[in-house]
Amino acid sequence: MKPPFKKDEHIIRSWLQSIAAQENKKISELTYVFCNDSYLLELNRNYLNHDTYTDIITFPYQEGDNIESDIFISVDRVTENAANFQVTFRHELCRVIVHGLLHLIGYNDTTAEESQLIRAKENFYLDYLGSTSDFLK
C-alpha cells in the first residue's frame, strides 16, 4: 500500500522528532506500514490475542530513551474514523501517528485518567502541527 503522504514525509519526520525531544526522548528508527483492516486484524489476533479492529499497533524494540518501533496503521480505520469525527483523512492519520508515538514514549490509555491525558497530548501536538503549517487541511 502506498504511504498516504510520501511527498510530505519530511514534515511528519520533523514533527515527530520535535515531539520526542519535548518528551525527552529520541527517535532512532520508526518504520510505518500502512495496511488494511483485515491485515491489522490478523496481527491483532496473532500477536496481541485481540479479536477486534484497531487503527494502530506498535511493535517496539527500543532500549532506554531511544525510540525504535514498527508501526502498523489501518488506512481503512483511519478513513472511517475521519468520517465519524468529521475531520480530514490527513488530520485523523496524524492523530493516529502521534497516538502511537505517545505510547512508545510511555503514555497509556487503559484507564479513563490515562485516556484523558493521552488525548490531551494528542490534541496539543496536533495543534502544534496545525499552527506551524497548513498540513492538516
Image (spheres, helix red, strand yellow):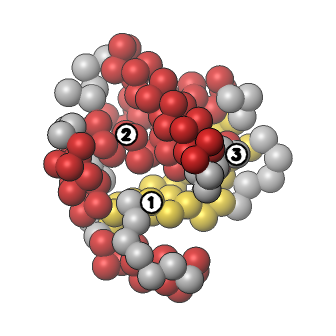
Q: For marks 2 and 3, give the one nearer the viewer.
A: 3
Instruction: Quadrant for residue 38, please give it.
Output: bottom left
The residue where tag 2 is placed is 94
Residue at the image point whose x is 73% and y is 28% from the top: 24
Looking at the rendered structure, the kind of residue marked 3 is Gly
Amino acid of disc 1: Ile
Within 10 Å of disc 3 (Cα), the crowding (few <14, some 14-19, many 20+) is few
Mark 2 vs mark 3, CA separation in Å: 18 Å
Across and down, in percent, residue 16 comes to 52, 34
Horizontally, residue 41 falls left or right of residue 118, namely left
Q: Quadrant of residue 48?
A: bottom right
Amino acid on which disc 2 is placed:
Cys
88 over 100 or under it: above or below: above
Tag 2, which secondary structure? helix
N-terminal label among 1 and 3: 1
Task: Verify CB contact (< 8 Å) between mark 1 and mark 3.
Answer: no
Which residue position is annotated with label 1? 56
Q: Which residue is mark 3?
A: 106
Give the class, few, some or many, for how many residues have Cα within 10 Å of label 1's Cα (few <14, many ≥20). many
